[in-house]
Amino acid sequence: MNLLRPILVAGWLVLCAIASPASAQVEAPDALVKRVSTDVLDAVKADPSIQAGDINRIVALVNDKILPNFDFERMTASAAGPHWRDATAAQKQALQEQFKILLVRVYSGALAQARDRTVVLKPMRDKATDPEVVVRTEVRGRGDPVELDFRLANGGTAWRIYDMNVGGVWLVENYRSTFTQEISASGIDGLVKKLAEKNEAAGR
């Protein structure tokens, strides 16, 4: 798992940064992945504070360049499973916020290692005209290359990431079992509380 964490970091940054709404023309999904992944990894390499694990700099990067550009609501809804439909608007917002903080804090410690990575695209199997596609990449650096796949959906004006696969593990599926188990035991509020406690403890 330790070997995968730097790849997850790179993947998380790429995942969040895809599909900039500022683009005048919708790019092909694979071209978009390549361009944005390069830009984000370059930003990490150029920022010693991020490499040192400065959580404030990491959060700033996430908020400024990442979160506005992907379907985080869909990710959270998928992780919560069927229980999402019964949640109130306030509960949904609270769960999204805590899930975001969790992901940022989980991967912040490995950002320094991401500076040695590059993302190489693999040939597309889907058509860019399809409503949803999988963009397959390979992360290269120290050690063996690692497969990193992205699921994207075309919302009409931009491609948006809603899941990624690192070494055979899909991000959303990885959290779904834990989330649904906690929701079944103590409801959405219980899950939000548990995530908030973990996030607060990690921030001390």
Image (cartoon, helix red, strand yellow):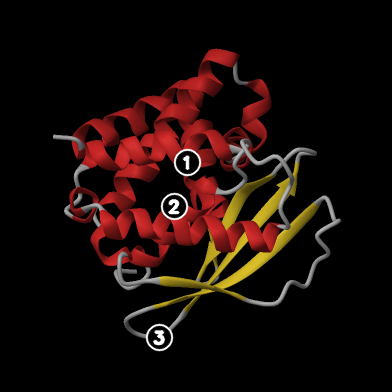
Q: Amino acid at mark 2?
A: Leu
In the rendered view, tell whether residue 67 sits above or below residue 33.
above
| Residue of label 3 | 144
Find numbered disc 3 in the image and state the secondary structure of the residue it sits on.
loop
**Residue 66 tag number:** 1
Between residues 180 and 113, which one lies in front from this camera angle? Answer: 113
Residue at the left extreme, as displayed:
204
| Residue 203 image point, x, y percent | 19, 35
In the rendered view, tell whether residue 142 sits above or below residue 181.
below
| Residue 2 image point, x, y percent | 29, 69
Q: Amino acid at mark 3?
A: Asp
Residue 12 appearing in the image: no
Spatial separation of the CA atoms under disc 2 and disc 1 = 7 Å
Question: Foreground mark, 2 or 3?
Answer: 2
Between residues 103 and 175, which one lies in front from this camera angle? Answer: 103
Q: Please identify the quadrant where the N terminus is shown.
A: bottom left
User: Do the residues bearing badges 2 and 1 touch, measured as CB atoms within 8 Å?
Assistant: yes
